[in-house]
Image (cartoon, rainbow, N blue to C red):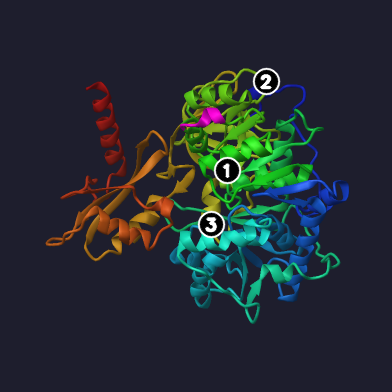
Amino acid sequence: MNDQKLWLQHYPEEIPAELEYSREPLQNYLKQSAAKFPQKSAIHFMGKELSYKEVYESALKFARYLKNLGISKGDRVAIMLPNTPQSVIAYFGSLMAGAIVVQTNPLYMERELEYQMKDSEAKVILTLDILYPRAAKVKPHTSLQHIIVTAIKDYLPFPKNLIYPFIQKKQYGLVVTVEHEGSQHLFTEIMKMGVPEEVEVDIDVEQDLALLQYTGGTTGSPKGVMLTHKNLVANAEMCSVWLYKDKEKGHNILGILPFFHVFGMTTVMIFSIMEGHKMTLLPKFDVLTTLKTIQKQKPTLFPGAPTMYIALLNYPDLHRFDVSSITACISGSAPLPVEVQEKFEKLTGGKLVEGYGLTETSPVTHSNFLWDRPRIKGSIGVPWPDTDAAILSMETGEQLGPNEIGELGVKGPQVMKGYWNRPEETEQVFKDGWLLTGDIGYYDDKGYFYIVDRKKDMIIAGGFNIYPREIEEVLYEHEAVLEAVVAGIPDPYRGETVKAYVVLKEGKQLTEEDMNDFARKHLAAYKVPRIYEFRDELPKTAVGKILRRALVDEEKKKIDDRKNA
């Protein structure tokens, strides 16, 4: 253990170093908040308000319906939705039924969706009407037995619910009609049920899983991170004490970070339900819609990614909007530029600080203090309560001292149980009780931590984690491609952008457009390379391994040369 824990000397008295954690399973927090605040607004969604009582009763209906479909404790239920009331209802309803939630990115194409459904062996998937064809196509090749379908319009107020299908048809060019029969089920029909009794499920909060959250693998396929009820409850309770101001007033939390990403799921959805706060949900990030929503709904907390804050700051008509309701923002997913931090704080009058975490840690392990303490520029802050952190030598594994660079290791109640059906890979990331993060960093003599590089080749573009190997495998499937390597190159807006370096087979010709069309058929849009460079050969080691790092260094040198020209 790290006996010194230098960071604790900076904790304000409002933040305890250790917490007493509830023994309740995660779904019980919705029941408790519904009992305490039955008529309070739990969700605002594009003009529609749902009370805590309504959300709780809807989750009970969903839980009972899952039981009627034969879902038992430990079965997996996939939720493939943007941020909508249905995503919250289904999440807690699945847990009430004793199921394990499999959060699934709605941007996934068939290849990615099929892999995740096969790996998790999910029996049920809830998805949007416009995504139904994708789910239906992969169903025969997976363990899926049932598809539950919902639509954005299902929770829109009148007259938006009537207008939206026409907007959707224009935007996506399709209208999907699904009947409530056989293995197809309509969410709206489920919600017509009478309010049932609770489903009795015995949950061991320390051992039983609440969630399979998939993360990409740098050396293979995406892995299911096993997060227990305790993991998620602990991280939300840590979040609660970190945000110690204005609790008694209650918060309105802007929910733009997607719930299919663990950062949004914990810091917006679980934290809100646990504390009885209100969530203002948006199904996707759009600058104008976000600014209008902030002005009208007056959220106080805005967890986000740097690209969101950058986009808002660069909106030409920003001065027309009042965003002064925002008191606190924790930024994650990518490094937060100091300039962005300072400009956003000046704009809102609130605080914007950088945090750090991993899918494997539910996700937050570190953050800067929001109030009452000076902020350290360039630092990810200090470990949260009950969280230990150390810098470990990459040669010996021994703990290093201040200002020595090594791999960041963490311990705490939010650390995952392991990877789903991957005991060997689980063993590789744990060393003497430390979860090895794969990130290279150091801490200073005051106990503040800094990340200097990533051990992994992971690309973070626009807040999304992107894994080169997965993209490369797709590019290699093109009949004209001889060699391909993908790297993240610096980008002033997205943090990094995806670039593919391609060597074509002799006699073959391709354009950037050809490669782009091919990639888009197999990959979610955010994974598709933005830039292609065709080369005669790629840099390699003596044994033939492509040197990705050499290509990244080339790009950085080009940028430096342009700056100095």
- Secondary structure under tag 2 reads helix
Query: Is residue 512 part of the magenta span, yes or no?
Result: no
Report, in whole angstroms, how far the alpha carbon at label 2 lies from the one at label 1.
Answer: 24 Å
Rendered image: mark on residue 127: none
Q: Is residue 93 above or below residue 291?
A: below
Closest to the observer: 249 or 371? 249
Of tags 2 and 1, which is closer to the observer?
2
Residue bearing mark 3: 105
Horizontally, is 198 left or right of 166 in the view?
right
Instruction: Give the residues in magenta.
Output: 316-320
Horizontally, is 232 left or right of 360 in the view?
right
Residue kind at label 1, given as amino acid type = Leu
Residue kind at label 2, given as amino acid type = His
Please provide percent x and percent y for residue 304. 57, 38
Rendered image: mark on residue 10: 2
Of tags 3 and 2, which is closer to the observer?
3
Residue bearing mark 1: 435
